[in-house]
Amino acid sequence: MDTVLKSKNNIKGTFTVPGDKSISHRSVMLSSLAEGTSHISGFLTGEDCLSTVSCFKKMGVEIEIDGTNVTVHGKGLNGLTKPTETLDVGNSGTTLRLMTGILSAQKFESHITGDSSIQKRPMDRVNAPLSLMGASIKGCGGEKLYAPLTVEGKNLKAIEYTLPVASAQVKSAIILAGLYADGETTIIEPEATRDHTEIMLNYLGADIKKDGNKITVKPVKELYAKDITVPGDISSAAYFMAAGAVCPSSDVTITNVGINPTRTGIITVLENMGADISILNERTVCGEKVADINVKTSKLKGTVVEGDIIPKLIDEIPVIAVIACFADGKTVIKDAQELKVKESNRIKTVVGELKKFGADIEETDDGMIINGSKELKGTVVESHNDHRIAMSMAIAALMAEGETTIKNSECVDISFPNYFDILNNF
Ligand code: S3P
């Protein structure tokens, strides 16, 4: 599918965004491993989270979906059954990494794979700690392990492990395996990453402790089913925050957005750029901080995005690059090499596509440099089948002169199925 967009200003109104992708995945995984029935509301019915649902159904979990309400009849930590077919994660790296942690501890062997992009996502980062725990994971690509994977369930040992890369997916895979280990597992993160797994596990009765960047996981006998409310995804809200900040005469409020401090790097960056942004009605829902976010158009200036803020905005870097195109002066994004192993190589895809609009942007080894305030011109851009590239280019299109076509834009269904409907009604 191709989507055509024209420039817009005067974007005013109150919007909601679909449920948080990371929390939606975890809600189905952990409810499946809990004893009893859980009702999940606000679930993201994007393709990635539906892949997680399909994997657990293949392991005997009954799951019903009614709009954004999901009912999961949990089987308990040891109640999953051997899947009769290969588990297919589609495009979802989170499903693949977290599931590998769970599968490592089951009493059966399983096969797991996904689409062509998934088969290029590195799995050695998950295999290294899980193998130390005694897991058996075999796949393609020799030492640099890639899906399809065969995971043979084992009795796991507790470990102490320092993560070489800041990755919530790897951390979560170890935590999930650690629930089944023979003692207390300790994980040390180089920088804090999203902690939704820890929050939800504690909410369901597990004992996960955090001391600085050190996380300790106690094995558990049981998790208890509880109803879960998923907040709106700040990664999806980021596109509307960007539109509110850069499109002339705009005033945008996004309600019910998760503002877990491990995810709010986009707010900090917008504040540093001089955006007019307010966080309203702060509250806590199922252990997660939630708020409404208002952004009004203002004059923005370039900034430097680097260091330990990177994991807090890793998925928002494509849209931050777009915002930087409309700020005065230079924006430098560093320490973001992880972008190379996302759904696409996001350093290359963001820089390449923004150049087509006429942006002054250069690729660096660990990020990019953008010289803002150049006029962008409507053009034809490619999504690279990466939802965040498609959605970011749409924001550039709102500010570009003339018309922009986004090719292969259907990939937004991964995380934000009605994205273009909302954008067209701006
Ligand atoms: C996610 C963690 C991040 C993020 C991804 C979702 C998660 O990946 O980019 O979209 O839900 O744990 P990494 O752990 O690879 O940084």
Image: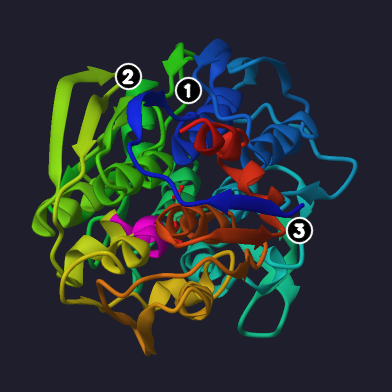
- Helix, strand or loop at mark 3: strand
The residue indicated by pointer 3 is 113
Magenta stretch mostly in which secondary structure? helix
- In the displayed structure, would residue 13 be above or below residue 307? above
Q: Which tag, 1 or 2, sits closer to the chain's start?
A: 1
Asked whether disc 2 touches disc 3, contact meaning CB atoms under 8 Å apart, the reply is no
Which residue is drawn at the image coordinates 64% and 60% (left, top)?
A: 405
Q: Residues within 10 Å of mark 3 (few under 14, many from 20)?
A: many
Asked whether disc 1 touches disc 2, contact meaning CB atoms under 8 Å apart, the reply is no
Q: Which tag, 2 or 3, sits closer to the chain's start?
A: 3
Q: What type is the residue that disc 2 sits on?
A: Cys
Q: Which tag, 3 or 1, sits closer to the chain's start?
A: 3
Asked whether disc 3 touches disc 1, contact meaning CB atoms under 8 Å apart, the reply is no
The answer to whether any part of residue 225 appears in the image is: yes
Q: CA distance from mark 1 to mark 2?
A: 19 Å
- Helix, strand or loop at mark 2: loop
Q: Which mark is residue 222?
A: 1
Q: Residues within 10 Å of mark 1 (few under 14, many from 20)?
A: some
Q: What type is the residue that disc 3 sits on?
A: Thr
